[in-house]
Amino acid sequence: MISSVRGKLIYSDSQVAVVECGGVGFKCYSSLNTLSTLPKVGNEVFLNTYLSVREDALDLYGFATVEELECFKLLTSVSGVGAKIGIAMLSDYTPDKITFFIASGDSKALTKSTGVGAKLAQRIVLELKDKLSKGPISLSSDTIAVENIGKSTASSEAVAALVSLGFSQSEASLAVSKLDPTLPTDELIKGGLKNLSRQV
């Protein structure tokens, strides 16, 4: 297993980075987020890697951060999410954003990535929601707060009400997560609306 590569960047484009280590060039498929952080060709680079082994190919995937690598592994553990879709999602969103969408149950936001339809997005949320808190990815404070919403019936009802008003699941969840969960539903809705109006 190749867990990382360090060496001279000898080539990069919108899909791959080639890193020369000890005279061997390792072709690493990468997300746009990682590729945008790379230095100029000729400089040293370090990538966390994942080796995908198939019958007809050995493909290496490289990421600038451990969080991005772990998010890629988490996404591709879902049936129907191949490496190409995982890379596409991490090109559109940071690991923080993806885990936030999953925690808030916002499958619609995930469909913006190429290859992710409504059914697949719902499967990603369903399969990964419970794995987030147990997994190796360090969750942002927003994601943790949103995860806790499900423990309060009033908070869940307030989020549902805000979604029915046209806000996205993630927007509504974040707005309500900043409020006292012991408040009654109507107060949470009012407070959520105030928080949402500040975000505009």
Image (cartoon, rainbow, N blue to C red):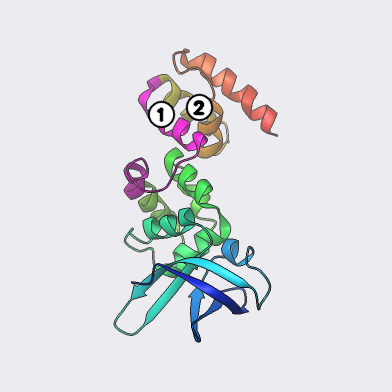
**Residue nearest the observer in this picture, 114 or 64:** 64
Crowd band around label 1 with a 10 angstrom C-alpha radius: few (<14), some (14–19), many (20+):
some
Crowd band around label 2 with a 10 angstrom C-alpha radius: few (<14), some (14–19), many (20+):
many
Q: For the view shown, which residue lies furthest in the left direction?
A: 55
Q: Quadrant of the C terminus?
A: top right
**Residue nearest the observer in this picture, 5 or 172:** 5
Residue 139 magenta-highlighted: yes
* One can see residue 115 in this view: no
Q: Quadrant of the N terminus?
A: bottom left
Residue 80 in percent (x, y) is at 35, 64
Residue at the image position 45 percent from the left and 70 percent from the top: 61
Is 2 located above or below residue 165 in the figure?
below
- Tell me where residue 162 sits by quadrant: top right
> Is 138 left, or right, of 131 in this rendering?
right
Q: Secondary structure at mark 2?
A: helix
Query: Which span of residues is magenta-colored?
Result: 126-153
Q: Name the amino acid type tagged 1.
A: Asn
> Is 98 left, or right, of 55 in this rendering?
right
Residue linked to disc 1: 148
Residues at circles 2 and 1 in contact by the CB criterion of under 8 Å: yes
N-term mark: 2 or 1? 1
Is 59 located above or below residue 91 in the figure?
below
Residue 40 in percent (x, y) is at 68, 73
Residue 79 magenta-highlighted: no
Residue 160 in percent (x, y) is at 47, 30
> Could you say which disc has been placed on residue 177 in the image?
2
How far apart are the two marked residues, 2 and 1, measured between alpha carbons? 8 Å
Is 86 located above or below residue 161 in the figure?
below
